[in-house]
Image (spheres, rainbow, N blue to C red):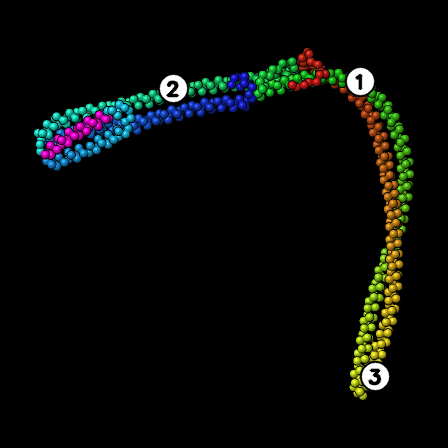
């Protein structure tokens, strides 16, 4: 990424990229350090767990073989069986350590040279063990001289060869340990040099990056401060160059727009001050004409106010007449409504009479039924008296009288029923007539109420007209007052126009301290690009 591309970045991304670069270098240093430390750890593990163990096993092997060689010589000087057994125990213990050391070496030795030396050690030990077994058997058999012969001829040379091979193996493992130590020291030194190199490079990179970031921010800010100070001194001729699109570039662009706006405003103010001076003179001339017309308008408004007062008196008289008509119509409506209510009561009373007549007819029907039953009972009593003969003759007379009374009661009930039916018919006819009269009264009441409503509307309209004309009259009076006030204001406006002319001259003198480019045309609108 080039410097130009970085310069076009905003301050936030630029700072983020710088810090990300430093953090990336730090992470890279940490990664390399961890890698080298892991390598040193592996080398140390190899030195401790393999090379050192192999060297220790070779030393143990050498010591055990030398001890067995010495114990072999002690067998020739043993005086009794217990001493011989003790020497054999030592020899067997050393054999176990030898076997363990060989097993360890066999597992850990990996180099071809080491494997070759270890194979020779195993061969030499096999020859030594075979020779020692012969000597031991001869000694146990009591053949001391033969044992000495075998010892000198086979065992001692085998021991010498074995010790030479073991010493060679131990020396080889010692060299491996020394070489591993040198390698670890070399890796430590190279890691130290690498970390110092990376640290120095990171410091240099951070210093250069910090210098570049500081310069890329402070230089545009210094230019912006210089431009602001120039504008504050009244010099608007500065040529602002915007070279970046970051925040400082945006600040310079804003200052450039502000400078152009101020140039435009100052030019317009200069032109406007001259226009204001010319306009104020025209305003003073126009105010004189306006004052004369305002006085004429005030005279006309006074005449209009007098006419509105006469119209108000006429409308008020109409309103009073409408209120009287409304009162009379309201009384007529109330009387008609009262008549309607009375007719309704008559209709209700006729309905009650009709219901009562019907109930009386029902009662007469019951009486007729009772008379009929009484007649039947009297007839039955007469029959029973006839059956009784002489004893029932008096009872038959009574039954005959009762029957006669029952027949007379039935006849009277029929006559009463007939009269009641006629009365009910007449009552129903009268009820219908009264109902029709009630409907007619209801219609009359509705018409009277409608007339009352219309007169009320006329009265309300008259009141509204009276109120509206009053408001118009008030408005005309207020307009007259306002017109008179306008006349005074026109005079004040003339004085203000003179003052405005003086202030325009002062404004032109004030903006003259600003320096603007010679080719500026104040009437051209400013366009920010």
Q: Residue at x 22, y 31 (%)?
A: 99
Q: Is residue 502 visible?
A: no
Task: Where is residue 394? Give x, y as percent.
Answer: 82, 85
Image check: 471 left or right of 502?
right
- Magenta-drawn stretch contains 474: no
Which residue is pictured at 86% across the width and 65% down the height? 424
Contact between labelled residues 2 and 3, with CB atoms less than 8 Å apart: no
In the rendered view of the protein, which quadrant contains the C terminus?
Answer: top right
Residue 423 in the image, given as x and y percentages of width and height = 88, 66
| Number of residue marks | 3
Q: Residues within 10 Å of mark 1 (few under 14, many from 20)?
A: some
- In the foreground, 296 or 502: 296
- What is the number of the mark on residue 193? 2
Picture quadrant where residue 71 is located: top left
Residue 31 in sight? yes
Q: Dot 2: what SS?
A: helix
- Rendered residue at 87%/27% (across/down): 297
Instruction: Tell me the element at label 1.
Output: helix
Question: Is residue 481 rendered to the left or right of residue 110?
Answer: right
Q: Which residue was labeled with disc 3? A: 397
| Part of the protein shown in magenta | 118-141
* Front label number (2 vs 1): 2
Q: Which residue is mark 1?
A: 281
Q: Is residue 64 above or below residue 497?
A: below
What residue appears at the point 50 percent right and 22 percent down from the top-left corner? 18
């Amino acid at each position: 990424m080039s410097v130009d591309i970085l310069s076009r970045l905003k301050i936030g991304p630029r700072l983020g990229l710088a810090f990300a670069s430093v953090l990336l270098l730090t992470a890279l240093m940490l990664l390399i350090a961890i890698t080298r430390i892991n390598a040193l750890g592996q080398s140390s593990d190899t030195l401790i767990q393999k090379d050192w163990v192999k060297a220790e096993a070779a030393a143990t092997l050498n010591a055990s073989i030398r001890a067995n060689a010495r114990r072999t010589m002690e067998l020739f000087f043993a005086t009794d069986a217990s001493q011989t057994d003790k020497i054999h125990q030592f020899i067997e213990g050393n054999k176990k350590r030898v076997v363990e050391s060989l097993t360890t070496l066999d597992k850990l030795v990996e180099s071809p040279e080491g494997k070759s030396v270890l194979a020779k050690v195993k061969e030499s030990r096999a020859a030594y063990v075979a020779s020692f077994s012969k000597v031991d058997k001869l000694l146990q058999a009591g053949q001391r001289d033969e044992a000495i012969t075998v010892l000198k001829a086979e065992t001692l040379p085998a021991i010498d060869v074995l010790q030479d091979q073991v010493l060679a193996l131990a020396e080889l493992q010692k060299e491996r340990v020394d070489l591993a130590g040198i390698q670890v020291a070399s890796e430590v030194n190279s890691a130290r040099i690498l970390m110092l190199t990376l640290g120095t490079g990171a410091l240099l990179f951070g210093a250069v990056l910090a210098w570049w970031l500081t310069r890329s921010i402070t230089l545009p800010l210094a230019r912006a401060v210089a431009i602001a100070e120039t504008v504050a001194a009244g010099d608007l001729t500065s040529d602002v160059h915007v070279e970046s699109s970051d925040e400082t570039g945006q600040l310079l662009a804003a200052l450039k727009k502000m400078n152009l706006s101020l140039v435009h405003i100052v030019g317009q103010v200069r032109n406007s001050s001259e226009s204001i001076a010319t306009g104020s003179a025209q305003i003073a001339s126009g105010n004189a004409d306006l004052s004369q017309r305002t006085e004429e308008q005030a005279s006309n408004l006074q005449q209009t106010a007098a006419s509105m007062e006469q119209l108000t008196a006429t409308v008020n008289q109409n309103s009073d007449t409408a209120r009287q008509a409304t009162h009379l119509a309201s009384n007529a409506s109330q009387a008609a409504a009262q008549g309607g209510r009375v007719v309704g009561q008559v209709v209700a009373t006729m309905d009650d009479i009709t219901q009562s007549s019907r109930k009386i007819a029902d009662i007469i029907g019951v009486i007729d039924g009772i008379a009929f039953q009484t007649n039947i009972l009297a007839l039955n009593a007469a029959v029973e008296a006839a059956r009784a003969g002489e004893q029932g003759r008096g009872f038959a007379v009574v039954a005959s009288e009762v029957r006669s009374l029952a027949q007379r009661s039935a006849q009277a009930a029929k006559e009463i029923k007939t009269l009641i039916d006629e009365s009910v018919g007449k009552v129903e006819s009268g009820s219908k007539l009264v109902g029709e009269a009630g409907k007619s009264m209801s219609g009359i009441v509705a018409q009277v109420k409608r007339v009352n409503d219309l007169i009320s509307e006329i009265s309300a309209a008259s009141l509204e007209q009276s109120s509206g004309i009053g408001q118009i009259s008030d408005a005309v009076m207020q307009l007259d007052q306002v017109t008179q006030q306008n006349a005074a204001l026109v005079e004040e406006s003339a004085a203000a126009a003179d003052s405005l002319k003086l202030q325009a001259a002062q404004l032109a003198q004030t903006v003259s301290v600003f320096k603007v480019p010679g080719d500026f045309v104040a009437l051209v609108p400013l366009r920010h690009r």
